Image (cartoon, helix red, strand yellow):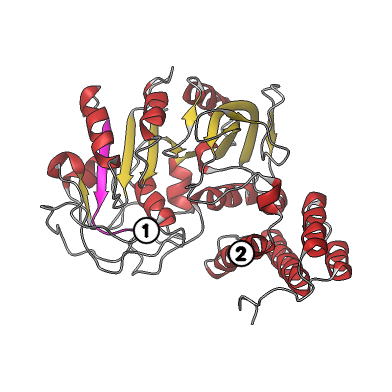
Amino acid sequence: MTVSVCMGIYNGEKYIEEQLDSILGQTRKAEEVILCDDCSTDRTVEIVRLFIERNGLQESWRLYCNGENRGYPGNFYYVMGLCAGDVVFLADQDDVWAETKLERMCAVLEEHPEAEVLACKFGLMDGEGERIHAVMAPSRSLGTRKLRQVGLREIFRKYQWPGMVLAYRNGWYRERGMGICGQESPGQKGVRTAREAEECRKDGSWSHGETGQSRKDGSRSHEETGQSREDGSRSCEDAGQCGEDRSGPCGNGGLEFRVPHDIFLCAMAAEEGAFFHMDEELAHHRRHDSNTAAEEHRVGKLLQRERKLWEIEKYLRMLGEFEERRVLRTEAGKRILREKTRAMEGRYEALQSGRIWRVLRAAARDWRQVRAVAVVCDLMIVRGGSREGFKDSGYLK
């Protein structure tokens, strides 16, 4: 079993070296580590390049620089497509792994061939590296090391598996998921191993090891929506266009797939009964003011009505793309998706109304889809909110 570690990076100069150290220090080494910078405007690229050189990793670690900003989802889907290992581990630039993460998860995957996607548990830490003990922390390990199967309904009810805890079988992903997110199927134009991609990059990316240049302009900020850069500027001063494929982040004619890569993988595998979760904490997820996904565990922040409406709007857009791209194949999976969409629309409308009775009615109707803690939060938001109601964001017009 060969292992790839892949990481999409962007403006991560503050924390990335600590994460690179934790990957390098694994008791089970990865055959390749693939990183792709999404037009950073800080020293991220320089830090990574120097780390690779200082540790003599040029043969197995590869750094790419996007010619245009792909956005968070697009960049990850792109770098996932470059991985050649049997198993791919997703990594974020600001987290820290336990030194046994690759070893332990590979052992479970070897023992359980039925698992296409595997997750471990994780702890939280703040920007200073101090452990966070929060009431609303998404994942707690009991230390049992037990493995359990996770169903699709649970994925949509409470998502608690960020990319940094996931490993997936590359063959399954190429067969099941690449076409959905816009990448081409194995053997077709546009699908390359990391080595092939390095030899002939026809999609607007360049290997940093070849150009050695940093960005010359200040592009717009990184957006979670996955939109590409508007000005079309390139990330490397002397990088030339190599080939004619300018079709977008996943080679899909510019129709970008904005569903985050982690929930995409988990939902597909869960529908097939192939997503498993091990009760072992093997990573620490860093929460700070610049998290790309804007995760939150502080109760005070979670009870802000504008934020909650924004979160639901974002989630509804994601569910809409699940349906539009036909991510789920079975009738049972499609029914769960419809039920979750209806529940989130009802929750959104109840919050907009500012009325306690509407929150309770929506919760009673969709009790299988909404957690009790979410209902309590919504009631607290409505009770503490303005009696003038909420400003209509326009999503459900």
Going by the numbered disc 1, the residue's amino acid type is Ser
Give the structural element (helix, strand or loop) at label 1.
loop
**Residue 44: image x %, image y %?**
30, 41
Q: From the image, which quarter does the N terminus lie in?
A: top left
Residue highlighted by disc 2: 310
Q: Relative to the observer, which residue lies in front, 289 or 52?
A: 289
Q: Which residues are magenta?
A: 60-70
Give the structural element (helix, strand or loop) at label 2.
helix
Q: CA distance from mark 2 to mark 1?
A: 19 Å
Q: Relative to the observer, which residue lies in front, 391 or 214?
A: 391
Image quadrant in which you'd find residue 59: top left
Going by the numbered disc 2, the residue's amino acid type is Trp
Residue highlighted by disc 1: 221
Q: Is residue 217 left or right of residue 366?
A: left
**Residue 255: image x %, image y %?**
40, 69
From what the image shows, is residue 202 above or below residue 42?
below
Q: Is residue 334 left or right of residue 49?
A: right
Residue 63 is one of the magenta-drawn residues: yes
**Residue 154: image x %, image y %?**
71, 48
Q: From the image, which quarter does the C terminus lie in?
A: bottom right
